[in-house]
Amino acid sequence: MSPEQVFSLEGQGLRLESAADIEPYIKALRDNQDVREMRLGGNTFGVEACKALAGVLGSKTTLEVANLADIFTSRLLHEIPPALSALLEALLNLPSLHTVDLSDNAFGLNTQAPVVEFLSQHIPLRHLILNNNGLGPDAGTTIGNALTALHGKKEDARKENKDVPDLRTIICGRNRLENDSMEAWAKALAAHQGVEVVKMIQNGIRQDGITHLLSQGLRHTSKLRVLDLQDNTFTRNGSYALGDVVGSWSEVEELGFGDCLLTARGTDELSRSLAEGNNKKLQIVRLQYNDMDTRALKAFKDAAEGALPALRRVELNGNLFSEDDASIDALRGLLSERRAAASVGENDEGAQDWGLDSLSDLEDEDDDDDDEDDDTEDEDDDDDEQDEDKSKAAVDKKAERILKDADEAEGENVSLKADAVVDDLAKTLQKTGLS
C-alpha cells in the first residue's frame, strides 16, 4: 500500500470536538479518491467531529482498512455510543472494508451496541481486532452473538451468488470474557469455520470455559493457522480437551498456551497428541509456566523429532525440569540444525523466531518424582489428585490477580498504547497473504 493511499492522523494527540475542529484534518481524506487505509489512533474524537468525519467516509468505497484504536480517551460514557454509531454506520456501506481495529476503546455493556450492530452486518469483514475494550462477560456474549449473526448474513449473500469472504482473523484479548461468554464465542467459532487466526489472550477464561471453547467451537476451525490463548486457565480438563482437538488443525503453524496451567499431565497429553503426526506445519509452540515436568518434556521432544518437521521455535521457561535435562539438549540441537538448514544465522533478521527461549526461571522437580513408575493405575490416580490440588491453588491465585487487574483497569482511561499483538497484525497479514 503506497503512502498516497493511507490517510493518517495517528498519534497526534488531537482533541477534536466539532465539525470545525476536524475540517482542516479531513480535507486530505475528502480529496483522496483512492484511499485504502485510515489510521485515527492516539487522538480523541467528540460526537460532532465523528459525524463530520462519517460524512466524508461514506463515499470512500476504496477503503480496505480502518484503524479506530484508541480514539475515545477521556470521553464521557454518554459520548461514545453516538460518536461510534456515526463512524460505524458510514463504514457499514463500504464494500471493500475488510479489516477493522477497535482496540483500546471502552466498550462495556453500556457502550457496545454500535459495535454489535456493525459486526452483525458487515459482510466484507475478514479481520477483526478487539483488544483491551473492557467488555466483560455480558458484552462479550453480545459480541460473540453478533459474529454468529454475521455468519448468517454472509451465508445469505452467498446464496445470492455474491463473492463473500470468510472471517479469517479474530483478535479479542484482555477483555475479561470469562466462562460466561464462552457459549456465545464457541457458537461463533463453530459458524466461522474458515477462520485462520484466533487470539484471545488474558481473558480470565477458566477450565470449564476453555473446555467448551475448544470442544464446541475451535474443534470446527479446520483452517486454523494461529491460536493464542495465553494467560487463561486450562488445568487438566482443559488440557485434555486441547489434546482431543489439536489433531483437527492440520494447517496450524503457531500455538500459544503460555501461563495456562496445563499441568504436568496436560502437557504430556498435548505432547502425545502432537506426536500423532497431524500437525506437520506447526512451527512455533509456547508452553511457558505450565508445570510441565520431565516426562511431558520427553514426550514433547519425541513429538518434535518424529512428528513436527516444521517446528522451529519452542518456549518452555518456567516449567518443572532442569536446563541440563537430556530432552532440552536434544531439542536445542534439533532446532539449531533446522535453523542452519534454513540458512538463518544467529544475527539474521528473524533469528529470534528459532530455537528455545531463555530458560532462566525453571524449577527442578523433586528427585523422587523423576523416579516414579507411571504405569500403575494407583500412581496415576495419585498424580491426578496432586495435579488437581496444585492446580486449584494456582487457579484461585491467578483468578484473583486477573480480576483485580481488570477492576483496576476499568477505573482508568483505556490505554493509549496499542497492544503488541495488534501492532504485529499488519506484518502477519503481509507474511501470510491475508488481505
Image: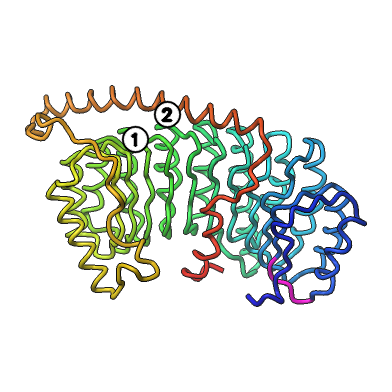
User: Is residue 20 toward the left or the right of residue 282 in the image?
Assistant: right
The label number, if any, that marks residue 337 in the structure image: none
Q: Amino acid at mark 2?
A: Lys
Does the CB distance between marks 2 and 1 fall below 8 Å? yes
Q: Within the image, what quadrant is residue 127 found in?
A: bottom right
Task: Tell me the element at label 1.
Answer: loop
- Residue at 82% of width from left, 68% of height from top? 59
The CA span between labels 2 and 1 is 10 Å
- Residue at 27% of width from left, 68% of height from top? 339
User: Is residue 406 toward the left or the right of residue 117 in the image?
Assistant: left
Which quadrant of the rendered structure holds the N terminus?
Answer: bottom right
Identify the main secondary structure in magenta. loop
Q: Residues within 10 Å of mark 2 (few under 14, many from 20)?
A: some
- Please tell me which residue lies in front, 74 or 234: 74
Residue denoted by label 2? 398
Task: Tell me the element at label 2.
Answer: helix
Rendering coords of residue 182 (x, y %): 50, 37
Q: Amino acid at mark 1?
A: Leu
Q: Is residue 288 magenta?
A: no
- Please tell me which residue lies in front, 402 or 249: 402
- Residue at 31% of width from left, 50% of height from top? 315
Highlighted range, magenta: 33-37
Residue denoted by label 1? 261
Which quadrant of the rendered structure holds the C terminus?
Answer: bottom right
Q: Is residue 34 magenta?
A: yes
- Please tell me which residue lies in front, 346 or 261: 346
